[in-house]
Image (cartoon, rainbow, N blue to C red):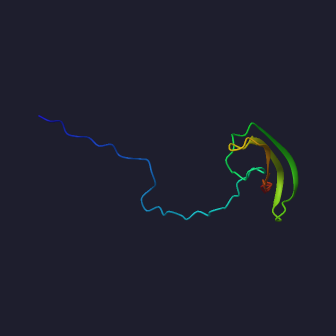
Amino acid sequence: MSTPKTTKKRTGGRPKGARTEPRPTVAVALSRCTACGSTRRTPYTQTRRTPYAGRTPDGQPYTAVVRRWTRCEDCGQARVDLSYEHTPEEKPSN
């Protein structure tokens, strides 16, 4: 005689009836080598984050300047990638 097959109730995944919400897409410019123009780079070797508030050249606010050391994979040129981070201040709860 064969034994009846048991099935497990699946609990993972998205709930039935849940909608797929569209997510915004943000374009990000990659850093380029100043010598050859390549966007290929080695992993960052050092990162330095400096708290400093201001506005980027295109007018966006920032709260920190981040410098990351790397090298171009194509020509070996060393460079420091500079980026700006913005962390809005938390609003105090009432």
Query: How many labels were placed on the picture?
Result: 0
Q: Residue at x 80, y 54 (%)?
A: 89
Instruction: Determine which quarter of the picture holds residue 74.
Output: top right
Quadrant of the image occupied by residue 93: bottom right
- Where's the C terminus, which quadrant? bottom right
**Relative to 42, does residue 91 appear above or below in the rendering?**
below
Seen at 82% across and 56% down, the residue is 62
Residue 77, image x, y percentages: 77, 43
Q: Position of residue 76 (x, y in %)?
A: 73, 41
Is 41 placed left or right of 54 in the picture?
left
Q: Residue 64: percent from the left, percent from the top?
A: 83, 50
Dividing the picture into quarters, in which one does residue 73 lie? top right
- The residue at the far left in this view is 1
Near-viewer residue (16 or 20)? 20
Residue at 29 percent of width and 43 percent of height: 7
**Between residues 85 and 74, which one lies in front from this camera angle?**
74
Query: Residue 8: percent from the left, percent from the top?
Result: 33, 43
Relative depth, front residue between 79 and 28: 79
Q: Is residue 44 above or below residue 85?
A: above
